[in-house]
Amino acid sequence: MKINKLYIALLLLAVVAPFFLYPVFLAKLLCFALFACAFNLMLGYVGLLSFGHAAFLGTGGYVTGWLMMNSGLTPELAILLGTVTAGALGALYGKLSVKREGIYFAMVTLALSQLVFFIYLQAPFTGGEDGMQGVPRGNLFGLIDLSDNMNMYYFVLAIFLFGFWLVHRTIHSPFGQVLKAIRENEARATSLGYNVNDYKWVAFTISAALAGLAGSTKTLVFQLASLTDVHWHMSGEVVLMTLVGGVGTIFGPVVGAGVIVTMQNYLSGGELGNYIHIIMGFIFVICVLAFRSGIVGELQKVWKRNFN
């Protein structure tokens, strides 16, 4: 009951938030929160550290951007196709990587992500280093004008809620319980008759599709798809967001994304803008040393220790 009340309170907060804060900033935060939730599905519930999730974020963004500029599709269809394309790429990359473990898995995903980066750098349809600029937002279902920032925000909020619900449903399903078993003891899960590589592959595909959904939505919000979204720095940022918020917690990635995006937004325009990566690195070190469970993880420990 308490959890349900918390969800309702947070939903109401999200509904009224654009009346007090800039809607585009909030939409950006939700896009990265969804990206972090997708990544956390792999790291927090399967135990696999991917350094290549930027490939799926950027793929969804580029496909959606190209479709909006050249096909005349409505935004919901363009986002759907961007998500499917990212999921298909994830299915391919998952087959190549899930048989590896630990640092080997991380390095394979990083190498595959860099391959995608260089393809998009050279491909003519992406605009290269200039990116894909002036992507139209279009009309949702042919009726709702997304050029209005408030309409755009509520559309992004609906997409985020769907992605968050999918992650929540996945990890609390029998499939999710098997994923947790693989994370805790892969050998024992194998001995129980589970094909762990197939479970990892499905989880990788779902995670990639959700990352593509985040990238597709982000392209419409900023009307831009660029190489920044496929660069390895982006893969590092989503790791940081998840660790700061709390790996293996449902709200951790959302909180971590909020902290990092807010910090970037308010520091980038000031005197500290040139040192933002140093500051982010400093925060990362503090979290690893002092808050190993992340913000949400530590709060959960305090709650259990004092109120249970």
Image (tube, grey):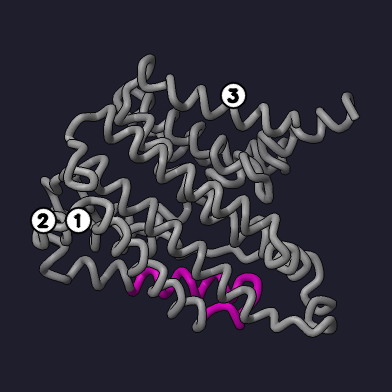
Alpha carbon distance from label 2 to label 1: 6 Å
Indicate which label's residue lies in the foreground, 1 or 3: 3
Give me the C-alpha separation between circle 1 and circle 3: 34 Å
The three-letter code of the residue at mark 1 reads: Gly
Prevailing SS of the magenta stretch: helix
Residue 149 lies within the magenta run: no
**Left or right, 211 with reference to 179:** left
> For this rendering, which residue is in front, 243 or 205?
205
**Residue at horizontal 17%, vertical 61%?**
67
Amino acid bearing label 2? Met
SS assignment at label 1: helix
Q: Nearer the viewer, residue 140 or 97?
A: 140
Residue at mark 2 = 69
> Disc 3 marks which residue?
9
Q: Measured along the vertical axis of the image, is residue 227 above or below residue 88?
A: above
Residue furthest toward the top? Answer: 20
